[in-house]
Image (tube, rainbow, N blue to C red):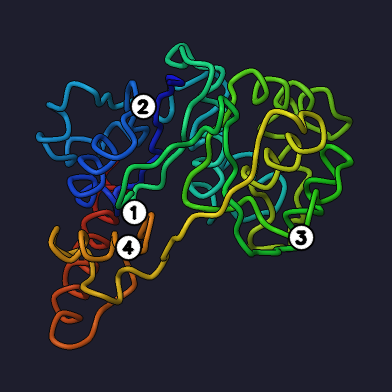
């Protein structure tokens, strides 16, 4: 059996849902370790139940590696686009890449997993020691424009690599980062070069999953194999984040994973409870951000 760690870059809005996702990850994915990577100042709001779980470790997103932090990403974005509303969105993508360079990365593979997604049944991420890419249907042109600017790569196929998880091979991720570092794009390091390769007018213009997936299938075509999972992104419409284990067991009959985005509400009257829950989280997050 292949050993691997799980990383979960997580924002404050998903802290309280970790109590649901982590037990399912331990049971159905069985990683060596789980690294929760977040704003360390806000991490005191993560449940003690999670903190006391032996397999879990909380890491400071600003200290994972040198030359990567929220403030630095914000600075690079302001230099490139004059706005930086997406600093956190870019940072969580860079964290998934940067983990390969960190002292915590001790396995040949690591799995990035979305904090709002529950694995409903036992999942394997390897087939005969080949890591697996999960296929999805999404075609966002700015992602591929950035991919071409960075690496002169065209999309491998007509499917998307963007899903709620991805298994990374550490050595390949390091090679990808080195190639970006050596590109002709203006920038002091691979983080700034990625940002400078994006279209400053595009709202979302970089995908770490599309970049890594297309890079692998172009330069390491024999390493990965492809598969499709039965996933459902709109789990919040069922019962919000208050869904019970009994209903999750029922959904596991034909689903592999289910996701619960914070803004997806079920029908009345649960929608009122979910709205109040969401509003409370957003207000508290804003207060904490101002104070910190």
Q: Nearer the viewer, residue 144 or 164?
A: 164
Q: In the rendered image, which residue does mark 3 sit on?
A: 158
Left or right of 234, for residue 83: right
Few, some or many C-alpha atoms within 10 Å of disc 1 (few <14, some 14-19, many ≥20)? many
Mark in the foreground, 2 or 1: 1
Where 210 sits versus 223, above or below?
below
Q: Identify residue for label 1.
A: 116
The mark nearer the N terminus, 2 or 1, is 2
Secondary structure beneath dot 3 equals: loop
Q: Quarter of the image containing the C terminus?
A: top left
Image position, residue 5 (x, y; %):
40, 25
* Sequence-earlier tag: 4 or 2: 2
Dot 4 lies on which element?
loop
**Residue 114: where, in percent of width, then height?**
40, 47
In the picture of the structure, the residue carrying the numbered disc 4 is 260
User: Which of the two residues, 216 or 264, is positioned nearer the viewer here?
Assistant: 216
Q: Nearer the viewer, mark 3 or mark 1?
A: 3
The quadrant in which residue 201 appears is bottom right
Q: Find out whether the residues at labels 3 and 2 contact each other: C-beta distance under 8 Å.
A: no
Label 1 to label 4: alpha-carbon separation = 5 Å
Above or below, comparing residue 166 to residue 130 in the picture:
below
């Amino acid at each position: 059996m292949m050993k691997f760690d799980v990383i979960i870059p997580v924002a404050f809005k998903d802290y309280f849902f970790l109590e649901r996702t982590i037990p399912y990850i331990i049971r159905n994915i069985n990683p060596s370790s789980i690294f929760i990577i977040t704003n360390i100042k806000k991490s005191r709001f993560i449940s003690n139940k999670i903190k006391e779980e032996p397999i879990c470790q909380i890491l400071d997103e600003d200290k994972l590696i040198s030359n990567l932090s929220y403030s630095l990403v914000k600075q690079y974005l302001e230099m490139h686009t004059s706005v930086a509303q997406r600093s956190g969105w870019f940072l969580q993508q860079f964290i998934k890449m940067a983990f390969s360079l960190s002292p915590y990365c001790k396995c040949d593979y690591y799995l990035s997993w979305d904090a709002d997604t529950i694995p409903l049944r036992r999942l394997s991420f390897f087939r005969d020691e080949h890591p697996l890419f999960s296929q999805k249907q999404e075609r966002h042109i700015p992602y591929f424009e950035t991919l071409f600017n960075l690496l002169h790569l065209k999309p491998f196929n007509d499917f998307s690599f963007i899903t709620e998880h991805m298994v990374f091979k550490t050595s390949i991720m390091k090679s990808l980062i080195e190639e970006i570092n050596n590109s002709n794009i203006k920038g002091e390091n691979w983080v700034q070069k990625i940002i400078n390769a994006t279209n400053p007018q595009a709202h979302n213009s970089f995908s770490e999953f599309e970049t890594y997936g297309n890079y692998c299938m172009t330069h390491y075509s024999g390493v990965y194999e492809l598969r499709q999972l039965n996933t459902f992104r709109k789990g919040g419409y069922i019962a919000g984040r208050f869904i019970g284990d009994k209903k999750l067991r029922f959904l596991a009959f034909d689903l592999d994973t289910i996701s619960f985005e914070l803004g997806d509400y079920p029908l009345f009257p649960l929608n009122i409870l979910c709205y109040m829950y969401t509003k409370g989280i957003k207000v508290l997050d804003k207060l904490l951000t101002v104070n910190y």
